[in-house]
Amino acid sequence: MNVALANRMQHMRASEIREMLKVTQRPAVISFAGGLPAPESFPVEELKEVTRRVLEEEGARALQYSTTEGHAPLRSRLAARLTARLDADVPADRVLVTTGSQQGLDLLGKVFLDEGDEVVCESPTYLGAINALRAFAPRFVEVRTDDEGMVPDDLAARLAACRRPKLIYVVPDFQNPSGRCWTRPRREALLAIAARFGVPVVEDAPYRELRYEGDEEPALLALDGDDLVVHLGTASKIFCPGMRIGWMVAPAGLFDKFVLVKQGADLHTSSFTQIVFDTYLASHDLDAAIVRIRALYRRRRDAMLAAIAREFPPGVRTTHPAGGLFLWAELAEGVNARAVLARCLELDVAFVPGGSFFPNGGHENTLRLNFSNMPEDRIRDGIARLGAVLRDVAVAARGISLARQSILEEAV
């Protein structure tokens, strides 16, 4: 079909993770690819009762159009919960209910970005943010990170070199893909530098409540004294991803702008799912459910870390996430994780090559592993298969290196 498309379509790419999930639908595949919560954690029975009650008591209202800002009782409940858990003052009139936090990223692009504007981000960063913001044709500026978060000196230098920096996008709590959690000094440094340059900060916090060890770090929203932080949250990782309930907390001067662009996108997030979620929160203990989810995911994380220690060859560096759903592996220089994946798929094991998480390319010797969606026995089995491939690759790489050294010696 020969039709004229919008210029933005040339910047759009299929999500590598979404495409990978198509491959991993076979039951035999041990998938460490998607960021899928464990389905056994979903409150199916409770939602049967809540849904029936909503339809019986509020059927017509739950199935009717609603306001763009969101269901008012849910906004108030979310504001109270965020105020308590983030130790921040979050009024209900600054909470916008979104269709998953992914929609929040799209709204940010619409409000802030023109073609050629700069988005400053961690290196690596969340693939879903790259895909959502790429539609607006920005220039991504990657900032060096380590186990404590963004390196402040590098952030300041890169902002100074930018022409039109519009956003600083970060996932400070158990980052997707690396699993890293920022220290408080790095959070404070980020906000100080952002204030100096006058650039808004997007705090994407889908994993914040999934901590398995260590002390909680303050949210950027709680540390923000300059009204620079836009906070994104979601029920997907602590409740049910299929409900598509997320939220955005925006400074007063920006809130109406996000409402305006959301009106053009979907009018409002599903009234029905909002009321079901609000009714669940009012009648059930979400915090107790999160405690059970944490225990489940900690066991799975520990199973993966122990299996990696047994099965991976020397020289593979991995993170030790204190929370979240992912850990990150860095292979030897010159090893291509996409080639490793091709061999693993033959063994019915899947992961996501790490190059996808670098908006400007490179770093093909990295990969992301998810531990939340597989039981411990399958984690051990899958890591054993992956480890066997990595050991073969390491042996082959050593053979090539020795052959090159021999050739060089003969030439001399």
Image (cartoon, rainbow, N blue to C red):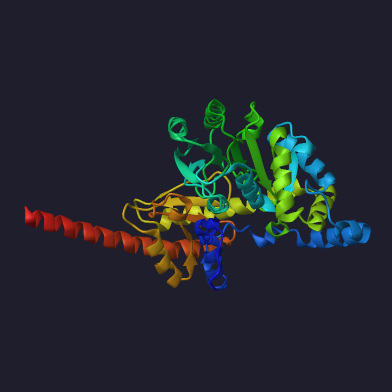
Q: Is residue 294 left or right of residue 341?
A: right
Residue 233, placed above or below residue 345: above
Q: Is residue 58 left or right of residue 263?
A: right
Residue 270 figure quarter: bottom right
Q: Look at the image and tell me whether residue 244 can be seen.
A: yes
Q: Is residue 261 left or right of residue 297?
A: right
**Residue 157 pos. (x, y %):** 43, 31
Residue 353 figure quarter: bottom left
Residue 154, placed above or below residue 75: above
Image quadrant containing the N terminus: bottom right
Task: Tell me which residue sits at (63%, 57%) in the image.
Answer: 37
Residue 89, placed above or below residue 263: above
Comparing 191 with 393, the one in front is 191
Q: Is residue 247 left or right of residue 363?
A: right
Comparing 78 with 258, the one in front is 258
Comparing 20 with 283, the one in front is 20
Q: Look at the image and tell me whether residue 246 can be seen.
A: no
Task: Tell me which residue sits at (70%, 54%) in the image.
Answer: 265
**Residue 181 pos. (x, y %):** 54, 40
Residue 5, placed above or below residue 175: below
**Residue 274 pos. (x, y %):** 79, 53
Comparing 177 with 111, the one in front is 111
Name the outermost residue toward the right: 57
Residue 374 figure quarter: bottom right
**Residue 96 pos. (x, y %):** 74, 44
